[in-house]
Amino acid sequence: MLERLILALMAIGVTRVTGDCSKPPLLENGFPTNKFTPETLFDVGTEITYKCNLGYVFKKEMLNGSRSVTCKEDSTWTALEVICESKICGNPGKIANGYYEAPNATFGSKVIFHCDTGYKMVGRSFRVCKADGWDGQIPACEVVECQRPELPANGKIKEGFGPKYRYRETISYICNEGFEMVGDHVIECKENNTFIPAPPICKPRNCGNPGNILNGYYELRNASFETKATFYCNEGYRMVGRNLRLCKADGWDGQVPTCEVISCDLPLLNNGTVSSPSSGDQWEPGMVANYSCDNGYSLIGAERLTCMASGKWDKNPPTCRESKMPLTRKIGETKEKPPATIVEDEGGLGTTGIVVSCIIGICVGIGGAAGLSFYNKKRQRTMCKKVHINPQPSENQVEANVNEYHDHPA
C-alpha cells in the first residue's frame, strides 16, 4: 500500500511538472473568446483572450493592461489586467425649446425629452443608451398653434379674435338673445394644437313652467324662446289680468293672471228690498233677485233679475217711486184749467194719458205731475170715459189702473 501511495504522489508531481492548466480565470461582464468546457485541460503556453459583454467596455485606465492569460509551466495562468465597465453614451443631444432628463448615460439607461411651455414635441420623446451609443434621433419642439374652430350656431365670439392662437390663448363665447349656452363658454389652446374643451353650443332658452293658475289652466306648445303660454279659467270663473305670457330672453314676461268666481254686483234699491242668495252676498250665475218696494212706493221696472254667466244682470234694475194719492175738491171749488194737450179729435185720447175721476160732478186728475190727456167739453156728462194709459209710463207719468168712474150730480 505504501508503494502505491508513493507512486500516485509521484504521478501527480510529474503531471504538474508537465504544466497542464485547468479552467482559466473569470472576467466580470466579459468572456473568453476561446471555446472550451470546464473539464478541458490547457497545455503550457496556451493563451486565452477576453472581450467585454455587449454594452460594456474595457475600463480606460486599464486599456494598456493584458486582455489575455497564458498557461504557465507551474500550471497556473498569468494575471488578467483589465476590467469591463458599463458603456457610457454621453450627451444625448440638445433640444431647441426643450430639455431632457437622464439619471445617467450608461448602457441601458433612457433619456426623456420635454418641450418648453407653448411648444409641442415632434418625434419620439426618449433615447436609449445602446452598445453603439444613443439610439434614435433627437426630437424637435415646435410652437403650439391652434386654428380657430367653427362658430357655434346662434352664438358669437366675445373675446379672443384671430385666425391662429398660441398655447394657452383662449376664446370666450356668448349666445344670441333668447339662447342659452350648453358647455364651457371659454376654450383654451392645448399641446396638441386643438382647443379644450370643445366649443359650446347655443340652444333656444327654455323658460320652464309659466306658472300655475288657481281655478284655471294654461296651454303651452313648448317653453322655448318667443313661445306663448295662454291661460284659461274654469267654468264659473273669469280672468283678471292678461291671459298670456311670452318666453323672453330673461324668462316669462308679465304675471300669472288670476281666476275669480263670476258674480253679479247687486245694485242698491232705495225704498225697497231684494231677496238675498242662499250663499250669502255672492250672486252667482243663475241666481234670481226678487225686488219689492216699501209701502207707499211703486216698483218701476222688472220685478225679477237673473245673474248671467257674463257677470251681468239680464235686465236693468228697477226703482221705487213714491205713490201719489188722488186729490179731491169741495163742491163749488174752482178747478184750475188743465194744461193744454194735443187732442186727436173731440172725443179722442192723447199719447200721454191721465185718469180722470168724477166725484159729485167734479173731475179730478190723479197724479199732479201728469198732463191731462182727455178733456170733455160737456162737463155735465154723468159718465167719465175710460182713459187709455201708456203701458210703459215715463218718469213724469204715474201708473194708474182706473177703468171707469161715475159722476153723481149735486
Image: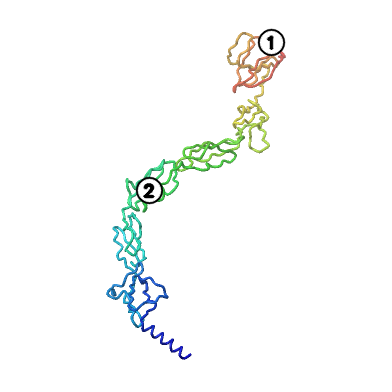
Per the image, the residue denoted by label 2 is 172
Position above or below: 70 against 110: below
Furthest-top residue in view?
346
* Mark 1: amino acid: Arg
**In screen coordinates, is 20 left or right of 394?**
left
Q: How is the image coloured?
A: rainbow
Furthest-bottom residue in view?
2
Which is more toward the observer, 16 or 3? 3
**In screen coordinates, is 365 left or right of 79?**
right
Q: Quadrant of the C terminus?
A: top right
- Sequence-first disc among 1 and 2: 2
Residue beneath the point at 36% across and 50% down: 193
Q: Residues within 10 Å of mark 1 (few under 14, many from 20)?
A: some
Instruction: Give the image location of residue 289, x and y in percent.
Output: 66, 31
Position above or below: 329 against 189: above
* Mark 2: amino acid: Ser
Count of labels in the image? 2
**Residue 381 image label:** 1
**Distance of label 1 from label 2 (alpha carbons):** 112 Å
Secondary structure found at label 1: loop
Secondary structure found at label 2: strand
The quarter holding residue 322 reads: top right
Nearest-to-viewer mark from 1 and 2: 2
